[in-house]
Image (cartoon, rainbow, N blue to C red):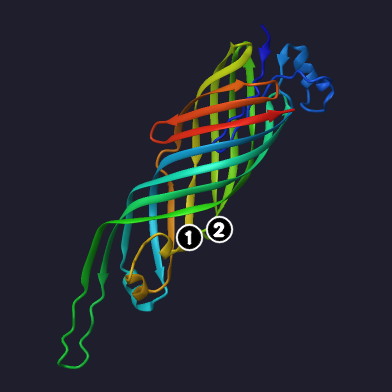
């Protein structure tokens, strides 16, 4: 039985799989470097170039570390100076469609770039405490007032967003007999429509699996995990996260700053890849644990 180096590429935002090399004169291509030597050792290599389109949906708990509000109204600003606001039960739902192009530079190393569209929503409960400054008595007949405590619990906050995601990464992969293993690592940026600046994400995803043969076509199953380091500082208009209703006209415009990260960076995964033809294949994966996800797509290699 020949050794295999699988062409399956996995990452948090997109992935692509590949057929084995059976293209005439493909051995004469420049990529992958050391490909000829690998084939002489008995390895089957994927076609060097690939494109893929992948959909991924994810639900994740958030750890909201801090929320700051900055009102332009000086009177409201004085109250905000004494404001204590915290968020709980925060969750994010994200849908992402990504296009990815890649090349196997070496038999064990694939590099890629990606671009896509991200759409999502964040929802949480906010607990707000403040002390409204007292009013000194001016004329003798108007008595002064003491500071007044204010406490509001369980206020719904949240916002919807969308934007463009772009980035790149690499895959280290190898296999023996019908077993394979890989680690996909990437770094992405997302420019959101309601947020000042960009959000960043670092993702790495180790997988191990086994290749079967079904109707003379390769069928690969794997298990693994995905680690996401997403620490964000999001800034925008207060109206985008908090519905103040008629009160909004009174307090006036303002800005918010939210610092947040994923409550649990790990998602456990399981999936499969099926070669439909020598160039086209399908892929499907689910994530489970504290975070849940589903991913599906198709790739083409040449």
**Residue found at x 43% / y 61%:** 240
* Whether residue 24 is situated above or below residue 128 in the rendered picture: above
Looking at this view, name the residue that lies furthest to the top: 1
Residue 268: x and y, percent? Answer: 45, 29
Pointer 1 and pointer 2: residues touching (CB < 8 Å)?
Answer: yes
Decide which of tag 1 and tag 2 comes sooner along the chain. 2
**Residue found at x 55% / y 34%:** 204
Residue 15: x and y, percent? Answer: 60, 32
* Whether residue 268 is situated above or below residue 188 in the rendered picture: above
* Whether residue 301 is situated above or below residue 43 in the rendered picture: below
Where disc 2 sits, the SS reads loop
Residue sitting nearer the eye, 229 or 93 = 93
Q: Which residue in the structure is indicated by mark 1?
A: 235
Residue sitting nearer the eye, 92 or 84 = 92
The quadrant of the image that shows the C terminus is top right
Any part of residue 190 in sight:
yes
Side (left or right) of 124 relative to 136: right
Residue 69: x and y, percent? Answer: 39, 65
**Residue found at x 42% / y 46%:** 92
Q: Which residue in the structure is indicated by mark 2?
A: 197
């Amino acid at each position: 039985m020949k050794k295999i180096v699988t062409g399956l590429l996995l990452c948090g935002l997109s992935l692509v799989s590949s057929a084995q090399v059976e293209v005439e004169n493909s051995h004469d291509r420049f990529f992958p470097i050391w490909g000829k030597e690998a084939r002489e050792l008995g390895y089957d290599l994927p076609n060097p170039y690939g494109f893929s389109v992948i959909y991924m949906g994810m639900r994740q708990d958030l750890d909201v570390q801090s929320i700051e509000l900055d009102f332009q109204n000086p009177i409201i600003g004085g109250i905000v100076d004494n404001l204590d606001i915290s968020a709980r039960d925060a969750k994010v739902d994200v849908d992402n469609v990504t296009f990815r192009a890649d090349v196997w530079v070496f038999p064990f190393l694939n590099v890629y770039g990606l671009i896509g569209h991200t759409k999502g929503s964040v929802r949480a409960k906010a607990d707000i405490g403040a002390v409204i400054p007292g009013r000194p008595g001016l004329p003798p007949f108007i008595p002064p007032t003491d500071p007044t405590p204010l406490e509001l619990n369980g206020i719904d906050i949240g916002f919807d967003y969308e934007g463009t995601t772009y980035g790149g990464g690499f895959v280290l992969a190898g296999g023996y007999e019908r077993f394979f293993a890989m680690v996909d690592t990437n770094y992405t940026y997302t420019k959101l429509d309601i947020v000042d600046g960009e959000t960043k994400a670092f993702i790495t995803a180790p997988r191990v699996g086994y290749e079967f043969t079904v109707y003379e076509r390769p069928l690969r199953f794997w298990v693994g995990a995905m680690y996401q380091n997403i620490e964000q500082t999001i800034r925008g208009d207060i109206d985008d996260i908090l519905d103040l209703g008629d009160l909004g006209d009174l307090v006036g415009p303002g800005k918010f700053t939210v610092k947040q990260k994923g409550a649990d960076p790990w998602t456990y995964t399981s999936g499969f890849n099926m070669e439909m033809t020598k160039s086209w294949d399908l892929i499907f994966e689910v994530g489970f644990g504290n975070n849940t996800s589903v991913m599906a797509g198709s790739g083409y290699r040449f």
